[in-house]
Amino acid sequence: MAKSKELTAAKRRNLAELTRGLRGIVLFLFLISGTINILALTGSLYMMQIYDRALSSGSIPTLVVLSTLAIGLYLFQGGFDVIRSQVLVRVGSRLDRKVAPLAHRVAIDMPRFGFSTSEALERGRDVDTVRGFLGSQGPAALFDLPWMPIYLAFVYFLHPLIGALTFAGAFVLTVLTIVSEILTKRLSLSTRKATLARNTIADCNARNAEVLKAMGFANRAVSRFNDANGEHLELQTKANDITGTFAAVSRVLRMLLQSAVLGLGAYLTIKGELSAGAIIACSVTAARALAPVDLAIGNWKSFVAARMAYQRLRDTVVALAGAEEPMKLPVPARRLSVEKATVAVPGSGQVVLSDISFELDAGQALGIIGPSAGGKTSMVRALTGIWPVLRGNVRLDGADLTQWHQDEIGQHIGYLPQDVSLMDATIEQNICRLEPDPDSRKVVEAAQAAGVHDMILRMPEGYRTQLGPQGAALSAGQRQRVALARALYGNPFVVIMDEPNSNLDGEGEAALTQAIESIRMRGGIAIVIAHRPSALVAVDLVAIVQGGRMVAFGKKQDIMTPGLQSTAKPVVDEAVSEELQEQVRRPA
Ligand SMILES: Nc1ncnc2c1ncn2[C@@H]1O[C@H](COP(=O)(O)OP(=O)(O)OP(=O)(O)O)[C@@H](O)[C@H]1O
Ligand SMILES: [Mg+2]
């Protein structure tokens, strides 16, 4: 209870941080819009004065004075308009600077929780959408809307009947705006879903480019994209139709109203109730009063998009508040303990591992074996904190993983994933985990430990060789060894390797064994998942994970050759490996 209260306080703080200073800026924009709108009466007043004073009196000096005054007021109006648009652009870029890194952080986290990359990247586009809207005509129209009564009052003051007519027109146009809001809102939601679905297919096709080419089903992939794109286009067309129709209707209505005001003005003039100058002034003012409504309807779609994007970003910022900075803990050096850990796939909540418990001390190495889909990778996802545990704990030196700062704990963990993917950067940047000022001695040390130093030196630019997207410039085995060097960089306390030898040759496997041995020698903990027993040469403990449970855990010789115990050969040979396969196949 206390915790949830704290969280809401943190959320409130985060939200306050996002909107800090915004209220003042909104008030300023509101007031400056008021000034602009009052100054916008210049045209109407000038016309009225020209007709009713200058023309009727035939006085040139009056004309000159009136004109000079009008020019001055116009200049002021223009100046304020420039200030307003510059403030809006700056509000947009300030929001961008503040929110873009947060949004990107969330985008990085989202795929872990089962979101597609397209969904994750949408957060980045949300920032662009909001900034783009703030730099457009839309917000100015929205700030002008509340000042419409000034014009209505002005017209009403000239003649109540014309005031009533303009008011009725404004009312009809406002109703139109509301109706278009209701109609587009529902559509925008489905359009967003369709856009996401289309982008996800495009993303997937691009990632499978090689397979599509080799087996010739690119055409089918394109037609799958086409179907999704068709739906997206249909919804887009519908939304554009609605906004386009409403924009046209409101434009025609506005022109109609302007003429009606002129007609009514003429009638009233004929009746002797209004001066000739006032007719023109009324017509111009009525048009100006309704312009923001017109503009707002025209920009409604981008306004709705920006509002939805802002809401998503707001939710994101609020959700991130849960990640309070934990306090600094001493470097882990003693023990990794897993206590009754149950692991579920984030997002779906499907339990893939239950009740896992074991302990590893400094200097120990654990080999994890078991059939495919047994839950090995899921287990290391929980050990590295990639997936949160549903129940139970994973502790380093007694502190649960959640008590560590994410970046800090990362320095004490080395992880070589099953599907190796490198960053689009140099080999050096990949190994040093994008450290801005890497210690080249440490980089070389890690490469040597992974047995990849000589290979890197043979590359065209050595450690400075650019790898391209996903490390495309390397062979699968090379990628795996560079990724191993990255896992070993900085001698992390726990090094977890998910099938590190799946692409390795004999030399690579020898280097791997050497690396595991040196982790143990320096007092670290190594965890190796392996289908091929050659990766288990240097481990002292073995666990079997099968059907989402850990069915065995113990000394390697006990697990892999029961009965042999102390006389067991330290190196797993083919016979033992066969026995292991047999064991794994047998139900627990
Ligand atoms: N992201 C995911 N979403 C849904 N289910 C998942 C996800 N990752 C794993 N699973 C499920 O969890 C189970 C265990 O998968 P895991 O990857 O842990 O197996 P594994 O033991 O590493 O297998 P392999 O030896 O083939 O790598 C599988 O049934 C799999 O379908
Ligand atoms: Mg796996």
Image (cartoon, helix red, strand yellow):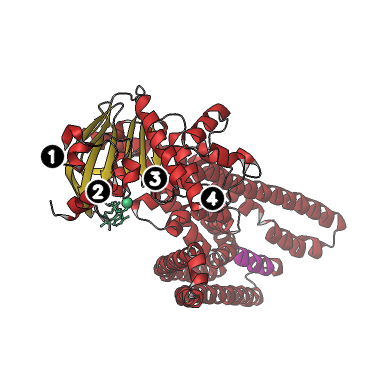
- Badge 1, how many Cα within 10 Å: few under 14, some, many 20+? few
Residue name at image x 22 percent, y 32 percent: 359
Chain part drawn in magenta: 279-288
Identify residue for label 3. 500
- Badge 3, how many Cα within 10 Å: few under 14, some, many 20+? many
Identify residue for label 1. 563
Tell me if label 4 and label 1 are in contact, CB under 8 Å: no
Q: Given this view, does label 3 or label 1 mark the residue nearer the observer?
A: 1
Q: Quadrant of the N terminus?
A: top left
**Vertical arrangement, residue 37 with respect to residue 384, above or below:** below
**Residue 115 magenta-highlighted:** no
Question: Could you say whether the residue bearing mark 3 is in a helix, strand or loop?
Answer: loop
The residues bearing labels 4 and 2 have C-alpha atoms spaced at a distance of: 37 Å
Which of disc 2 and disc 4 is earlier in sequence? Answer: 4
The residues bearing labels 3 and 1 have C-alpha atoms spaced at a distance of: 29 Å
- What amino acid type should be assigned to the residue bearing mark 4? Gly
Tell me if label 1 and label 2 are in contact, CB under 8 Å: no
Which of disc 2 and disc 3 is earlier in sequence? Answer: 3
Question: Could you say whether the residue bearing mark 4 is in a helix, strand or loop?
Answer: helix
As drawn, which residue projects farthest toward the top?
330
Report whether the residue tagged 2 is closer than 8 Å to ligand 1: no
Identify residue for label 2. 575
Question: Could you say whether the residue bearing mark 1 is in a helix, strand or loop?
Answer: loop
Identify residue for label 4. 471
Report whether the residue tagged 1 is closer than 8 Å to ligand 1: no
Residue 146 placement (x, y as % from top left): 51, 55
Report whether the residue tagged 3 is closer than 8 Å to ligand 2: no
